[in-house]
Amino acid sequence: MDPVKKVEGKALPLGYSDVDTDQIVPSDALKRIERTGFGRFLFSEWRENPDFVLNKPEHEGAVVLIAGENFGCGSSREHAVWAIKDYGFGAVIAPSFADIFKNNCTKNGLLTIELPKEKVEALLEAVREDPEAKVTVDLESRTVKGPGLEESFEVDDFVRYRLLNGLDDVGLTLQHEEDIEAYEKHRPGYMPSIR
């Protein structure tokens, strides 16, 4: 995964609470075997309504998704994260996230930023009033900046390290590649090998 230091640009004021992963990406899209191409399925049922916020041209190109409480609840499908990222979002700001969804985001380089509910609501209102408003999520300084808002956020140090360095589970393992190879060289020949 690519390192993530800062996500900056327009924001999509979704604002809904209790958005589950089936609403983020429907189950009929899960037949695909690739990890790419899921962006076209993002909120697909809701996008059938021409007034849905994602369909509005003023929000085209948004890179920050602003949601309500308990975003990403429901099933543990990683495809929801793939769809959000594939559509072009690099960060989701909400008062709270479902644990499995948040963990899946960490492993795929999507920032999940928890801010107090009143701060999220103020940011939603500012972006609704000015769709061109710039929102900046800075992982290095642990701050979110937007119209009339500069707020720090908490992030686990290890999660931050992984994201800043672009380390998914495979990348973390490969940091020990020399040790793994040394171990494999000294294993008895009758034991299974990765070679």
Image (spheres, helix red, strand yellow):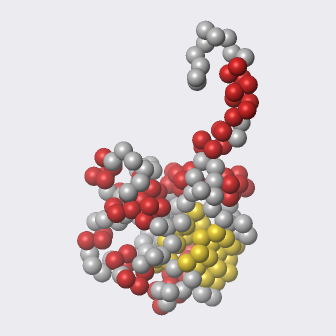
Of residues 162 and 175, the one drawn nearer to the viewer in this rendering: 175
Above or below, 153 relative to 193: below
Residue drawn where x is 73% and y is 32% of the image: 178
Can the viewer see residue 118? no
Quadrant of the image occupied by residue 146: bottom right
Count the numbered circles shown.
0
Among all residues in the image, which is located at the extreme bottom? 129
Residue drawn where x is 69% and y is 34% of the image: 177
Residue drawn where x is 64% and y is 69% of the image: 6
Above or below, 128 relative to 4: below
Can the viewer see residue 58? yes
Q: Is residue 29 shown left or right of residue 106?
A: left
Residue drawn where x is 57% and y is 83% of the image: 134
Among all residues in the image, which is located at the extreme top? 190
Q: Is residue 124 shown left or right of residue 55?
A: right
Residue 40 in picture, x, y percent from top left: 34, 63
Residue 48 in picture, x, y percent from top left: 25, 71
Of residues 1 and 126, the one drawn nearer to the viewer in this rendering: 1
Residue 124 in picture, x, y percent from top left: 50, 81
Residue 163 in picture, x, y percent from top left: 64, 56
Q: Quadrant of the C terminus?
A: top right
Above or below, 104 relative to 170: below
